[in-house]
Amino acid sequence: LAQLIEQPTKRVTLRDKQDFWMIKNKKAAYAKVTDKEKKKIRAQENVTESQINAQIDKLVRERITNEELLQLTDKDMEVLAIYREMVSGYNLSPQIIKSENVSADEFALVSERLTELPGVNTTTDWKRLKLSSLAILGRTTVPAKGIPKEKLNYYLARDYSRNDRVGESYIEAQYEDLLQGQKSVVKNITNRKGQVVDTVTTYEGEPGKDLKLTLDSELQLETEKIVKRELLNLKSRGGSYLLDRAFLVMMDPNTGDILANVGMKIEKNPETGKNEVVDYSYGTFTTAYEAGSAVKAATLLTGYNQGVVSMGAYMGDEPIELAGTPTKKSIFNQSGYITMNDLTALERSSNVYMFKIAMLMNGTPYSYKMPLRLKDDTFSKMRNNFAQFGLGVKTGIDLPNEFSGLQGPSGPTMGGKTLDLAIGQYDTYTPLQLVQYISTIANGGYRIQPHIVKEVREPSNDGQQLGQLVTEIGPTILNRIDNPVEEIDYVKKGLRLVYTGSQGTARAQFANTPYTAAGKTGTAEVVYFGPLKEYYGTDTLTFTHVGFAPYENPEIAYAVVIPWATTGREHLPNNNIIARDALDKYFELKAKYKAEKVTDSNVKQPILPAISKDKIGEDEQK
């Protein structure tokens, strides 16, 4: 076989070389161990013959010199590289000798000499070629790695071979059972010596299914550009040395279809030493952050649900002075007393209105310098209500490794932290949780499970048209929040004022939109606990934004998160800019698709030729 193919030798180890030298030079090898040493080894008690031989072989290996190993020729090394692959398998289990860079000549030469090569066969292999570098697509293992050790028993029990390619992350891992297909089943007929003399196919097998994703490829590409642009704009400012990531998720609030899932991260290229912006789309559901005022709609609806505040109720915004707790106040009101109702509280993003809701839930209306001792159920009541929207719990997305976020400690002496929870500055939430939360409000109170796969289809026959539909993944309602639709619609009015009201916190970016929309901005004052451990505890600001459109009949919901954006105190608008530009792009593409009469059922993605640079081989990815 070594005379017919060129076998790479980079996987050959020192141990392989030693063992091969021992095979080629058996007499000289075992002469390195004296009879006296062999006798001493055999004199040990309770050792088997195989253990004795192993000890002798170990001594031989230790005494093989580098000069002796250098006697192995290039051709010897190729033979060794082939041999090590052959002996690393299991009886009657196929071992892949060479699957990368097999030339047509090599394939032909081996194929026409199979009768001279007992036990050797030729077949075709596959490698996933992607049209996108989007990380959530996941990747498969290469034959050299095969099945990951931690899942070996799981896959072997399902008739996988140890060197099979399997999905090891995200979509490839989640839908492995569908994508892999069914292998053909063969019966090996052996002679008395255990040599295979014939192979009979008993089951032809079938190819894996095709998956159609919910992602809009054009929207995904354009929103990636938007997020990258604003991330770099922020990074160019002073005080941004902790900033390294930004996220945007866009979802149909009625179906749970994820239309765009964007995560961008600044990382240093280990080869060039320069910073680069890389895809971090999986961070939308595997990392969590304090969301700030973006959660205030949930706080207000929680107040209604608990009966501590009613629609249209007025309360005073004033600095909150509690015993043993630093002063808490709203950004826009540092010292005065401003009476406002709940809609204005959303429009202007009143912290104090939400603080007072939390204190009323505890059964302790605010009074100056009062001690705030929590009842046992105050934290749980607020968190349980937030969970109805999807905050602090897993969304149920069809991808592995989803993170539910972190909950801060609770206790009767942590009254101030309850107030922080009410304004989104205590527990952490993923960007995906935030889009599920605002979708729940947008669609009238139903928490919809997000999903990235829209359809399962039979394999395409021509590489152009989709195969026959097997399964369509429709909306899954996880729960309905306890608020009546009247309260939800009322809160939507407050979210509309955030965009259009004279004092709305996103008025500058959204007052002039050609479509109707509503949302909520957020700025969380947090301490840094990111990848740079030397800066742990540094005060930073995280910017967020949630919203939906059109206001009257929502069809798109979105969430933006920019963690640790600045160590300064300035409330920058980049979160709002991302939301506005992404929403503009959504409606622009919607109009384009309508004009071109493009629908889910007729859109085509041409199959690129194998030599196209637009395809990304799995082994080319880092």
Image (cartoon, grey):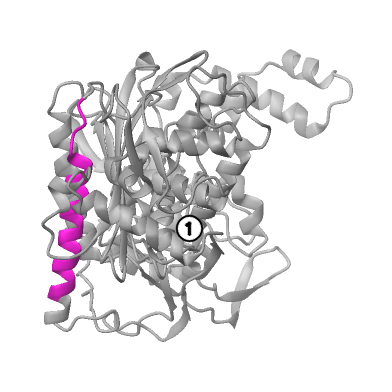
Split into 4 quadrants, where in the image is the C terminus?
Answer: top left
Task: Classify residue 620 as left or right of residue 39.
Answer: left
Q: Residue at x 17, y 76 (%)?
A: 593
Residue 351 or residue 223, whichever sits in front: 351
The reply to whether the magenta stretch includes residue 243 is: no
- Indicate the secondary structure of the residue bearing disc 1: loop
Answer above or below: position of 602 versus 511: below
Disc 1 residue type (three-letter): Ile
Percent across and percent down for residue 414 are 57, 23
Answer above or below: position of 201 versus 49: below
Q: Is residue 137 visible?
A: no
Residue 269 or residue 440, whichever sits in front: 440
Q: Quadrant of residue 523?
A: top left
Q: Quadrant of residue 571?
A: top left
Task: Classify residue 65 as left or right of residue 604.
Answer: right
Answer above or below: position of 488 versus 283: below
Answer above or below: position of 429 versus 301: above
Residue 297 or residue 200, whichever sits in front: 297
Magenta range is 570-592
Percent across and percent down for residue 399 are 47, 56
The residue singled out by tag 1 in the image is 397
Q: Is residue 320 visible?
A: yes
Q: Residue at x 35, y 68 (%)?
A: 214
Percent across and percent down for residue 499 are 21, 52
Callout 1 crowding tier (Cα within 10 Å): few <14, some 14–19, many ≥20: some
Task: Classify residue 338 as left or right of residue 391.
Answer: left
Predominant secondary structure, magenta span: helix
Percent across and percent down for residue 386 are 52, 47
